Image: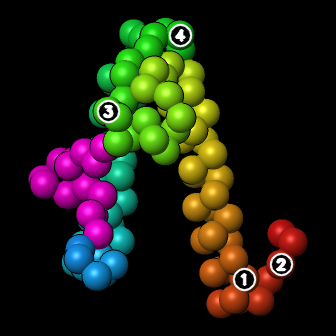
Amino acid sequence: MFVVGEGGHGPRLPLPGGAYEHDTRGPDEAMAAWQTEVARGRALIAEASLDDSGRLSEQEARHVGDQGVSLRWIMVHMIEEYTRHNGHADLLRERIDGTTGT
């Protein structure tokens, strides 16, 4: 599920033909929006247990394999996603500055 964040910004849905909407925010605005969403997420789970669970829609469950997910599963999944995207960013950085292994 895609959630629209503060000010109507959030993940962009693919457009027909595989294109994506162009995000016109600058780096400072994008960082501020990200920090707002991180703070919101932390507030939402502050009183929760990692064993708390919820249900995904049937469409979302097709990607996960089950409709029932725990907060623990969500948090681990987010760590995996951050790791994957940080790895992609590191590959791009290596292409720009040529530095590897640091």
Alpha carbons under labels 4 and 2: distance apart: 39 Å
Camera-near label (1 vs 4) is 4
User: In the rendered image, which residue does mark 4 sit on?
Assistant: 51
Label 1 crowding class (10 Å Cα cut-off): few <14, some 14-19, many 20+?
A: few
User: In the rendered image, which residue does mark 1 sit on?
Assistant: 94
Q: Secondary structure at mark 4?
A: loop
Alpha carbons under labels 4 and 3: distance apart: 19 Å
In magenta, the rendered stretch is 1-14
The tag earlier along the polypeptide, 4 or 3, is 4
Residue 80 pos. (x, y %): 63, 45
Nearest the eye: 36 or 86 = 86
The tag earlier along the polypeptide, 1 or 3, is 3
Question: As drawn, is 64 to the left or to the right of 39?
Answer: right
For the point 83% across and 78% down, which residue is it? 100
- What amino acid does circle 1 point to? Glu
Alpha carbons under labels 2 and 3: distance apart: 41 Å
Q: Is residue 8 magenta?
A: yes
User: In the rendered image, which residue does mark 2 sit on?
Assistant: 100
Q: Secondary structure at mark 2?
A: loop
